[in-house]
Amino acid sequence: MATTTRRRTVELPDHPDFLWVADQKPKKSYDVIIIGAGGHGLATAYYLAKNHGITNVAVIEKGWLAGGNMGRNTTIIRSNYLWDESTGIYDHSLKLWENLEEEVGYEMFFSQRGVMTLAHSVSDVRSKQRNFYANHVNAVDSVWLTPQEVKEIAPIVNISEDIRYPVMGATFQPRGGIAKHDWVAWGYAKAAADMGVDIIQNCEVTGFKIVDGKVQGIKTTQGDIAADKVGMVAAGHTSVLASMAGFDVPLQSRPLQALVSELNEQVLDTVVMSGAVHVYVSQAHKGELVMGAGTDSYNSYAQRGGFHVIEHQLAAACELFPIFERAHMLRTWGGIVDIAPDASPIIGLTPVENLFINSGWGTGGFKATPGSGWVMAATIASGEPDALAKPYALDRFTSGHLIDEHGAAGVAH
Amino acid sequence: MLHIPCPYCGPRDETEFHYGSEAHVAYPENSGNLTDEEWAKFVFIRSNPKGWMAERWVHSAGCRRWFNVWRNTINHQFGPSYKPFSQQPKSPA
């Protein structure tokens, strides 16, 4: 099978123990505390320091750096969303990705190999074309592919009309792609630490110190820490934090599973997603096939899900990519994602003064890492929602201005 | 896969069921007079506890009936299941 391979040989980055202080202890107080050392939290700290000159910052992490969803996602990056608000933040994020490795001085294997989203029915074609036209209106790169063109870009896709859900077309975003997720976290952590940010691991938040409706610090398993401002960037555990702070968030925490195969020859040099048959696939630089699908149906904090969900997505994968039938899966895992009613994030102010929220990224937060950190840092620094973050305010569930990306994003948000 | 205790049929595989989220969310009584904040709370806010949760399931591929059950969201352990409009058993916590 003649596909072009885009392998790169690079020096391995420094061992992460030496990129930041591994056993950093908290100081008595900080200007800003970020809760959660995942991608979004680290990016927030980085942009606070870089864009706003705020370096007296701690990132607090209950486990280890990037040990939550940042180390568990399928690393897909794209910005071809339906609504203007989504395009605003996701395309800003993609533009930041395009210079990120040079900016932070750290290899991330960012690879703009394109993201293809397949359509399998007449209504699927209509909704994907609507998306494709919306992308053009918003100046986001997007191409409509016929099944034959799908085959030219990804020769291993089965475009036969005789399968249960035949490929009837696809949207393609050439600027989309993948990156190596833990190196993204390490790059942000290193660059933030270099500017003076403290990264404090194994430190779980147990409460907030709130006086007269204003946050003054946090309580943790390593003692109380004072702060002028606090940002909650805790993904699946946002509801737990919000209840400690005394307010409700419209979020539900669900398991999202992913899996990888053994190392294979390079057979797929783009990303293929199919919301209709519930699978998305890319091939990492080393050669493992990385796949994901929809969430398990129930609320959970257990970081695992049911095997029938994996079976379902593998059935779809084997029909779409017959070459995968003999591949061996190496491992599966789950992360806990926080999903808002409109499947869009919640960013901005909270009912508690100087306590900020960045959550609800659900099943699609990895791609937004730079953009999310950028707008969160701006929001915390000024105390006012950043322009790109403004539509994502918590009060949209009262005003009714939802940003409903459910239908547009399908399963693979 | 979860093994869900249907109060009518006994324990069955998760694939026979569909999830119905938090149990005991009643339609507001004075729905003509609710503020936007109160509507938002009823429509969008659901508890999302880390621990025991009373939730609804429907046994779609079985008896096709709705029921409630206690389940722990930390370890997926089930507590008692019970029929709608019956006395809610105490949380196993």
Image (cartoon, coloured by chain):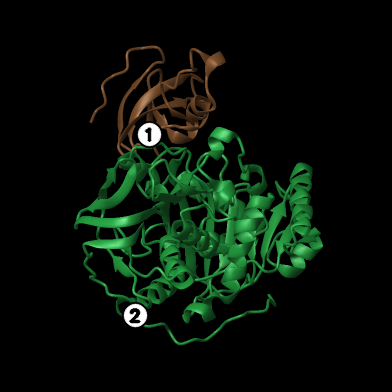
Q: Is residue A204 above or below residue A271?
A: above
Q: Is residue A175 visible?
A: yes
Question: Neighbour class for label 1 at 10 Å: few (<14), some, many (≥20)?
Answer: some
Q: Is residue A235 left or right of residue A207?
A: right
Residue at point 56%, 74% (across, down): A110
Task: Give the image location of residue A308, x and y in percent.
Answer: 48, 44
| Pointer 1 chain | B
Q: Is residue A319 visible?
A: no
Q: A164 and A387: which one is in front?
A: A387
Q: Is residue B8 above or below residue A264?
A: above
Q: Is residue A374 above or below residue A360?
A: below
User: Which residue reaches farthest front?
Assistant: A212
Q: A32 and A222: which one is in front?
A: A32
User: Which residue reaches farthest left?
Assistant: A223
Type of amino acid under label 2:
His
According to the image, label 2 marks what residue? A15
Co-location on one chain, circles 2 and 1: no
The hue of chain A in the figure is green
Q: Is residue A342 left or right of residue A193?
A: right
Question: Neighbour class for label 2 at 10 Å: few (<14), some, many (≥20)?
Answer: few
The hue of chain B in the figure is brown
According to the image, label 1 marks what residue? B3
In terms of secondary structure, where does tag 1 sit?
Answer: strand
Task: Give the image location of residue A355, x and y in percent.
Answer: 38, 49
Q: B13 and A53: which one is in front?
A: A53
Q: Is residue A22 above or below residue A314?
A: below
Type of amino acid under label 1:
His
Between disc 2 and disc 1, the foreground one is 2
Residue A133 figure quarter: bottom right
Q: Total marks drawn?
A: 2
